[in-house]
Image: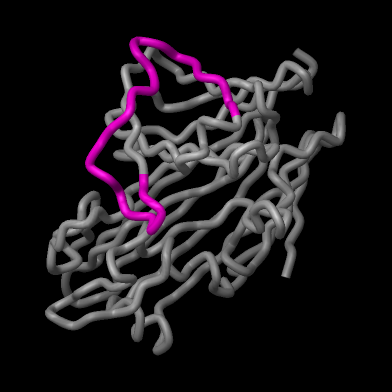
Amino acid sequence: MIYSIENEKFSAQVNSMGAELHSFRSKKTGTEFIWFGKEEIWYGQAPILFPVVGQVRNDTITVDGKSYNMQKHGFARKSEFELVSAEKSKVVFSLKSSPETLKKYPYEFELIVSYELNDSGLKASHTVKNLNDGDMYFSFGAHPGFNCEVGDTVEFEKNETLCTERISSDNLIIPEKFPLLNNEKTFTITKEIFEPDALILSDVQSEYVTINSPSQGRIIKVTFGKTPFLGIWAKPGAPYVCIEPWFGVNDGREDYGEFFNKRGIQHLSQGEEFNFCWSAEPFENI
């Protein structure tokens, strides 16, 4: 089900399936900032990645010696969330562990997702609660897609020297790294840049990027804070780009054994919570 929120400046819509952002629009100009999702290009819009990010080796995780089938990017994005509350400018959803999720991921959890509009734009907040008697391991990622064009630019907050990791045809990370920025802030969105798939960045110093669209007369600032990984991706030549703060990453080909050994894994002790938010602040008619 689609839920709508609004304030004086903006409107947004959220799909309870996956608690996925469906629309974020300026009321003044009618500009839509979120990719509308087109089946033949990419059906997603802003999926939430939990309890893994990317592909796990052999589609399998191992917890306490037992194997569990785990699909790419986890199951949250294809799960129906429960509506917790709906106000004029804010909506909150929850996904809790169930007999069905425990067959795939043997931890009791609650994932709470909220979207709120303010004078600057949109804030998306996420909380993972450990409801187990012991430790819990997981990965988490946001994956919002923003409308843009080939030739637009992505500009980091700070000068960055970055190499990107890449994935192979089976979505596993390869050992080689490739240079992206050398004490620079900006790269241009081209069709070619995403032909090998996503840019997978680590050691990013910036806490936000801006997507600059001169032909559309707009900038949108996407703030994600400090994250261990940042994915940037689009289907080659498609009119959107995804800015993806990740607390976790695709597997490589190494056999790391138990799930808690997975690269980038997050840990919560009994009763602890993980909290993360990102925001989108548009500037139009620049």
Residue placed most toward the observer, 201 or 122: 201
Query: Residue pushed farthest bottom?
Result: 99
* Quarter of the view holding residue 134: bottom left
* Residue 88 in sight: no
Residue placed most toward the observer, 224 or 179: 179
- Bounds of the magenta segment: 167-190
Q: Magenta segment: does it hold 172?
A: yes
Residue 242 drawn above or below residue 262: above
Q: Locate the N terminus by quadrant.
A: bottom right
Which residue: 41% across, 11% down? Answer: 184
Q: Where residue 183 sits in the image (x, y, percent)?
A: 34, 10
* Residue 72 in sight: yes
Q: Where residue 35 sits in the image (x, y, percent)?
A: 70, 45
Residue 95 drawn above or below residue 241: below
Q: Where residue 224 sits in the image (x, y, percent)?
A: 45, 35
Task: Please state if 202 lies on the left or on the right of 2 as rendered.
Answer: left
Q: Where residue 277 sits in the image (x, y, percent)?
A: 46, 44
Magenta residues: mostly which secondary structure?
Answer: strand
